Amino acid sequence: MKFNKFLVLLVVGAFFTLSVNAQQSRYAVINTKYILEKIPEYKDADKKLKELGDQWQTEIDEKQIALDKMYKNYEAEQFMLSEDLKKKREDELFMKEKELRDLQKKRFGYEGDLFKERQKLVKPIQDKVYNAVQKLAVARSYDFILDKSEGITIIFADPKLDKSDEILRQLGINN
């Protein structure tokens, strides 16, 4: 009999603890990849970016083929060339190689053409989704909204939950 009362008290206590914890933090889970794939403007932007990327990659591939051909020709002819001609051809190869690396960086590097196009085409759509997430969070009083599309990441967190300044104060750092 005492065991049954203890068990009931334990279950009630666990239920109470879970309900209190649930009231303390409200959260939701979304999948931004799924959301974006359902937005027609995003599909169009993604298609355009793929086409640009393919076009630029083809351009780079063609230049790489031409460079490879130049290298093969040089390797075949280098024994018959004078030192001056060797140096001139090596300089040409070096310059073509540098042009190719610069083009790759210009097209696909950090803040390159593809990055800029993505910012221009995709970022406004992502901002619309983020604004919708913020509105949902405020309207439904969510403390966190987690994004499960690329592993679990926090896409929204109520600023009042950020304890960074408190940690800085504990460390003796004034902000």
Image (cartoon, grey):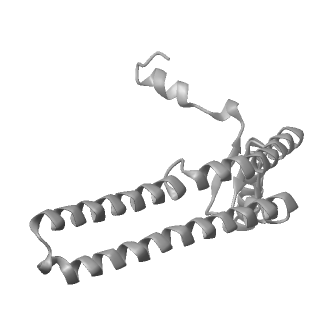
- Where is residue 66 drawn, in percent x and y? 41, 74
Quadrant of the frame with the N terminus:
bottom right
Q: Which residue lies furthest to the top in this view?
A: 174
- Residue in the image at 54% along x and 50% along y: 112
Q: In this view, does 109 lie above or below 62?
A: above
For this rendering, which residue is in front, 140 or 10? 140
- Residue in the image at 61% along x and 63% along y: 151
- Where is residue 134 drawn, in percent x and y? 80, 41
For this rendering, which residue is in front, 37 or 108? 108
- Residue in the image at 47% along x and 57% along y: 103
- Where is residue 144 drawn, in percent x and y? 72, 46
For this rendering, which residue is in front, 107 or 136? 107
- Residue in the image at 69% along x and 68% along y: 51
In the image, is 5 to the left or to the right of 98? Answer: right
Instruction: Give the number of marks.
Output: 0
Q: Residue furthest right?
A: 139
The quarter of the picture where residue 63 lies is bottom left
For this rendering, which residue is in front, 137 or 109? 109
In the image, is 98 to the left or to the right of 78? Answer: right
In the image, is 172 to the left or to the right of 82? Answer: right
- Where is residue 6 drawn, in percent x and y? 70, 61
In the image, is 133 to the left or to the right of 169? Answer: right
The quarter of the picture where residue 131 lies is top right
